[in-house]
Image (cartoon, grey):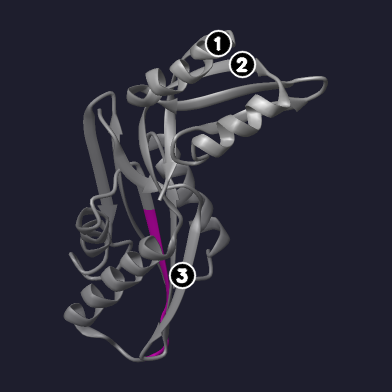
Amino acid sequence: MDCYLSLISDTQFKMNIKRSVFIGHAAHCESEEKAKEFIREISRRFKDATHNCWAYKVNMNGVEKFNFSDAGEPHGSAGRPIFSAIESLNMTNIVVVVTRYFGGIKLGVRGLIDAYNSTARKTLEMGQKGKYCPGKRFSIEIDYSMWNTFIGKFAQGKDFNIVDVEYGTSVRATLTCKSENFKALADFFVERRIPIEELGRVVFVERL
């Protein structure tokens, strides 16, 4: 699997529609089991709600898997619209649960479809998103002057991410970057005779 769009952190959005309260919850997940854990967690937290409808879409070793549930709402009025919101934003490794507290006014199937879709979509739109790409992890030891030059030349969150850093007599740092950008970063250190140790492959998250 190449790069894909997903959330960086959990997000929540709340809206009122004809006295019913809709609360969207969304999270990044990398397996069906993680998606199901999130669904169970939200369902437990909001066990007094009228409905906890959900959808997820994950890519596991190149195989796309998805599922959705109306959780007691009329067939096709909740789970599918939530999944459609994920699809419309072209996101992967995502789980969304939309909690509903019924307010006494029936919305009808069309109204429910719109309500669940818009709640899910707005929840995803407001969340901090990132591009998840094949990456590399590496470590360096560098003096402060050269470290400042490095972080001034390359953008953290886009060109590299800091996994760990220690500030002592020198800077010891473990970094990640996209696989396709590794050569550019490695050349920076090699040209300055700074040893670089490759630590393996990872998933690099570019903040958007």
Q: CA distance from mark 2 to mark 1?
A: 5 Å
Which circle marks residue 196 in the picture?
Answer: 1
- Of mark 3 and mark 1, the one earlier in the sequence is 3
For mark 3, give the secondary structure: strand
Foreground label between 2 and 3: 2
Distance of label 3 from label 1 (alpha carbons):
43 Å
Q: Which residue lies under the disc numbered 2?
A: 140
Mark 2 vs 1: CB contact within 8 A = yes
For residue 66, above or below residue 24: above
Q: Residue at x 36, y 69 (%)?
A: 122
Going by the numbered disc 1, the residue's amino acid type is: Ile
Q: Residue at x 49, y 20 (%)?
A: 188
Q: Amino acid at mark 2?
A: Ile
Please, what is the three-letter code of the amino acid marked with disc 3?
Phe
Badge 1 element:
strand
Is residue 115 part of the magenta span, yes or no?
Answer: no
